[in-house]
Image (spheres, helix red, strand yellow):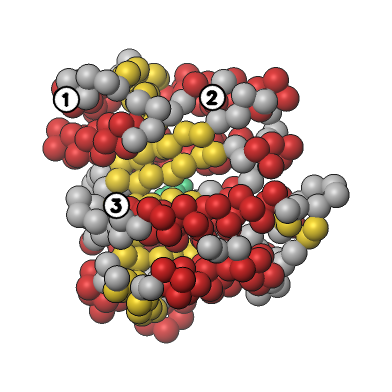
Amino acid sequence: MELNITCIPGDGIGPEIVAEAKKVLDVIANQYGHDIHYTDILMGGASIDVHGVPLTEEAIATAKSADAVLMGSIGGDTTTSPWYKLAPNLRPEAGLLAIRKALNLFANLRPAILYSDLRGACPLKEEISAAGFDMMIMRELTGGLYFGERSTTEENGVRKAVDTLVYDENEIRRIAVKGFDIAMKRRKKVTSVDKANVLDSSRLWRNVVEEVAKDYPEVTLEHMLVDNCAMQLVKDPAQFDVILTENMFGDILSDEASMVTGSIGMLASASLNDTKFGLYEPSHGSAPDIAGKDVANPIATVLSAAMMLRYSFDLDREADAVENAVKQVLKEGYRTVDIMSEGCKQVGCRQMGDLLAERIR
Ligand code: IPM
Ligand code: MG
């Protein structure tokens, strides 16, 4: 099969971790008889430095012409980097929002898994972590507060800022359908998270999710208020299978969920549109403090590449091979510093990539 992949190495540790994911993908291509063509584009600070903007039209066009996009991370230190002296719409993060919108990537899948070999990293009490957990956060990614109208004004010497939270039923329905589809391939439970006791957008969200649920009689649907969900994630994370929620809530809850795994360096993500196209990136940020030191954990990016094989190319066997290589390396006791524990063997970013590549079969 021919795989045309646009890569966004980005900023901070981005280039290092993308290099390791490519290393693993190249071994997959070799062993399973595929042809991969990579084209790099600039985004975030890397693009600002060259073009003065965080994402160019040409870069968007290149990404659109590919089958999938593999991304590292973007952004720098918000207090010291000159990128953050620019107007908000010219900062690195604006590039990420722009590519999500331009490619219509409305469905963000963020798996949060407690790996059995990393159970010790979970910050929760042992009686909770012992149950393990494996949830998929489905976050709406192109609507809500992130893309509603906003303004900052001054009236009679009083500064005022407005952000608007807008959803129409079609935007809710398409993410709900994806959520239920994914639940069908998992443990068949959807927890739809909203703030329906306060927000109109949440009441519409709840109604539309109920309508979609009628087409999925095998799936158990429950509704949960977002504040309660924040609590339940630390009290009893094992109760969750698919968490379906809007953009802002999903941003916050997915960070919380990743933290309870204790190893954000392990968590992949996929952002999909309504075709097979997707953008795949680790859930963590660009970690500028450790960039270029060969200590970053490339596993989240490697697992994002596995999601790409699965969701954009339907290459399940290949995706399994990558995920098994990760489990194998962990079982053998190799760790990058972020997930290091006593008695394990500490390795750098490149060596972790080599170990993973060697274990592909
Ligand atoms: C994320 C990030 C982004 C978001 C930022 C960088 C704009 O936090 O992908 O979760 O808020 O969506
Ligand atoms: Mg976030």
Per the image, the residue denoted by label 2 is 238
> Is 250 in front, or is 297?
297
Quick one: label 3 or label 1, which is nearer the N terminus? 1
Residue 299: x percent and y percent?
Answer: 58, 58
Which residue is outermost to the right? 343
Q: Residue at x 41, y 68 (%)?
A: 32
Residue 140: x percent and y percent?
Answer: 31, 41
* Above or below, comparing residue 246 to residue 56 in the picture: above
Real-space Cα distance between discs 2 and 3? 26 Å
Packing grade of label 3 (10 A; few <14, some 14-19, many >=20) is many
Name the amino acid type tagged 1.
Answer: Asp
Q: Is residue 59 visible in this depiction of the protein?
A: yes
Quick one: label 1 or label 2, which is nearer the N terminus? 1
User: Is the CB of the residue bearing disc 3 within 8 angstroms of ligand 1?
Assistant: no
User: Is the CB of the residue bearing disc 1 within 8 angstroms of ligand 1?
Assistant: no
Q: Residue at x 70, y 20 (%)?
A: 127
Q: Which mark is residue 272?
A: 3
